[in-house]
Amino acid sequence: MNQRDITYAKRFAVVGCILLIVAAALEYWPSSTALQWLNIDEAKAVALRQRKPVLVDVYAEWCGPCKSMDKNVFPDDSVQLILKSRYVLAKINGDDPVLGDTLRKQFHIKAYPTYIVLTPTGRERKRHVGFYPRSPFIEWLNDSTGVQILQWQELDKVVMEASLQKRRVMILVLNSSEEIESANDMFEEQKVGEIIGKHFVPTLLVKSNSSDRTAIEQLGSTGQEGMGEVIVLESDRKEVGRFRIDSQMEFNRTALANKLTELVAK
């Protein structure tokens, strides 16, 4: 080997060493573009400031589908763009010896992974259990179902607002977050929306949300038949009346509008 070959060999060796060092750094150092996962309390605080929903990832270290999501779905550029621009992210280890059991019970977790979308105020909007392929996951993240009724204020704030505006309180009680899409379609219908906007200050309670259960029990809404129930109160919380949302109202918005009008007249 001549001197020139030796020189080239040394240069290639140096370049090879540099590439190995860079590869090791990329493997073990966090990427500047990595998703920023917070604990649940941190995420809720940030969500309130930024007025964004929270995406909660409930996982377990031994969970194969969880690892597959982390390896194959979350690193995707399109997924990352949506998550970084539209959500505050929280991770919960369901097997954590300190917080896992409490949070598992709070969110009624039965399998891993479970993905839950919360409003900035902590209300559950929707959830998905299990592995989610890239395209359906993107579609699910982009879905804005129920945005309108989920922006209705909390019950205590609604009572104060109703007193100031000299209106009544309208409480929509749903059995689960799975009914939010249908309810949103019903209560955003033009005639129904006009009645609510003119006479009521509305709020939403969901029986499957642990944060809503106390208020629902105090209101005495315990039945499970049908989609849910509408309860109307005076601003001093005295009940005016209530009715169950039946199948007729789901397909005939006039029937729903007529029921609301009856409570306006009482």
Image: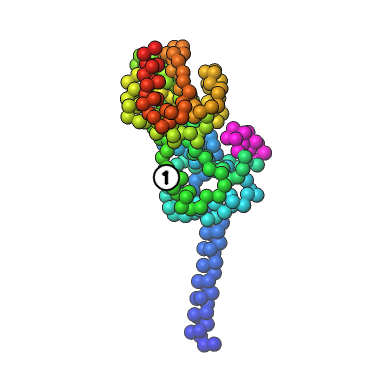
From the image, tell me which residue sits under label 1.
142
Residue 138 visible to an observer of this rendering = yes
Query: How was the colour assigned to the protein in this rendering?
Result: rainbow
Along the viewing direction, whichever of 3 and 69 lies nearer the viewer? 69
Residue that appears at 49% across and 27% down: 228
In magenta segment, residue 128: no
Q: Indicate the position of residue 154 as horizontal and vertical percent values.
A: 45, 24
Residue that appears at 56% across and 56% down: 28
Quarter containing the C terminus: top left
Q: Indicate the position of residue 40 as horizontal and vertical percent values.
A: 54, 37
Amino acid at pointer 1: Asn
SS label for mark 1: helix
Along the viewing direction, whichever of 71 and 29 lies nearer the viewer? 71
State which region is magenta: 96-109
Q: Indicate the position of residue 44 as horizontal and vertical percent values.
A: 49, 34
| Name of the residue lying farthest toward the right | 97
| Name of the residue lying farthest toward the bottom | 2
In magenta segment, residue 108: yes
Say whether residue 194 is left or right of residue 157.
left
Residue 80 visible to an observer of this rendering = no
